Amino acid sequence: MEIIQIVGLGFIVTLLILIIRGQRPEIAVQISITLATVIFLLVLAKIEVVLNLFRDLADKASVSQMYLNTILKIIGIAYITEFGAQVCRDAGEGAVAGKIEFAGKVLVMVLAVPIIALVLETIVRLIP
């Protein structure tokens, strides 16, 4: 199971960071960012599998690729926003993390407008 490897790596790096933070806090932040990047790269291949599955299901259900791509972008923005905010929090920059989360929410809302409009149009057509 890959998650056990990732959690184990996380524990080891956490211990290393706790040891180093007192002496060299700037290196501790760099190690934390490096770990975040390594974990992201480890799960990147799994994300591709899920995206291909979504595309296949959308084709079978005759869902427009435009809407599927929009939903996938929204999911991507949510994950990347959370990832970036957590890295900033790990570095002690909670204010920056909050700004990143705000920007992510705005971008999700902007991308969701066409889908919301489609849902509203469908509801209006169903009402006699």
Image (cartoon, rainbow, N blue to C red):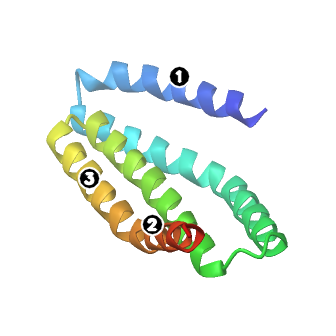
Q: Amino acid at mark 3?
A: Ile
Residue 25 in which image quadrant: top left
- State how far apart marks 3 and 1 are (Cα): 26 Å
- State how far apart marks 3 and 2 are (Cα): 24 Å
Horizontal arrangement in the rendering, residue 87 relative to residue 67 (left or right): left
Q: For the residues carrying marks 3 and 1, which lies nearer the camera in this image?
A: 3
Looking at the image, is 6 positioned above or below residue 57?
Answer: above
Where residue 39 appears, as percent x and y from the top left, is: 56, 45
**Residue 116: mark:** 2
Q: For mark 1, does the 10 Å Cα neighbourhood hold few (<14), some (14 to 19), or many (20 or more) residues?
A: few
Looking at the image, is 100 positioned above or below residue 52?
Answer: above
What residue appears at the point 70 percent right and 27 percent down from the top-left corner? 4
The quadrant of the image that shows the C terminus is: bottom right
Using the image as rendered, state which of residue 126 and residue 89 is in the foreground: 126
Where residue 51 appears, as percent x and y from the top left, is: 70, 63
Per the image, the residue denoted by label 3 is 100
Horizontal arrangement in the rendering, residue 45 relative to residue 18 (left or right): right
- State how far apart marks 2 and 1 are (Cα): 42 Å
**Residue 114: mark:** none
